[in-house]
Image (tube, rainbow, N blue to C red):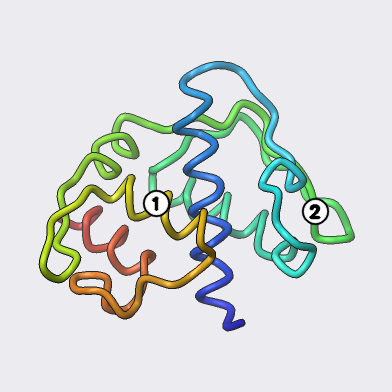
Amino acid sequence: MKSLEASEVVIGKILTLLMDWGIRPTEMKFEELELDEEYKPYFISCLEWLQDEGLIRVHEIVQFIDGGGFALSPVLTAQGLAVLGTQISTGKDADTVANAVREVADTKRSYSHVGEFVGGMLGALTKTLSS
């Protein structure tokens, strides 16, 4: 699996959990993503990327030597909620970024082959953020 595809899966899982959890104090660990160990090295950097892009707010991100770690009080920001609600083209149909994120997280497949997702889910998130 390519690094970009693995990053998409981890980001999809993180965002899906945060959508499900709502806005409440939590602690997110890699194990909660229910992914194979091969995805573990991407966990912290994906959290940091989401935070840097303004999609999530995190009180603190702690990284362990083994690549794992946790995030204290991660929540979606207003900007993150707006991005996830954005309508996008997926070829023939329109859908929301949130639905596409869930599908990437559930199926572990890249969206780089579908319509506006050329370049993957990360490209669509970045494009939506810059709009």
Residue found 54% across the figure and 62% down from its top: 9
Relative to 104, 114 lies left or right? left
**Mark 2 crowd level (few <14, some 14–19, many ≥20, 10 Å Cα):** some
Relative to 58, 30 lies left or right? right
Above or below — where is 50 with respect to 65? above
Residue beneath disc 2? 68
Above or below — where is 63 with respect to 27? below
x then y, percent, for residue 42:
66, 64
Disc number at residue 53?
1
**Mark 2 is on which residue type?**
Gly
Above or below — where is 131 with respect to 75? below
Q: State which mark lies toward you, 1 or 2.
A: 2
Question: Mark 1 to mark 2: distance in Å?
Answer: 21 Å
x then y, percent, for residue 2:
57, 83
Q: State the image quarter where residue 66 is shown.
A: bottom right
x then y, percent, for residue 127:
23, 63
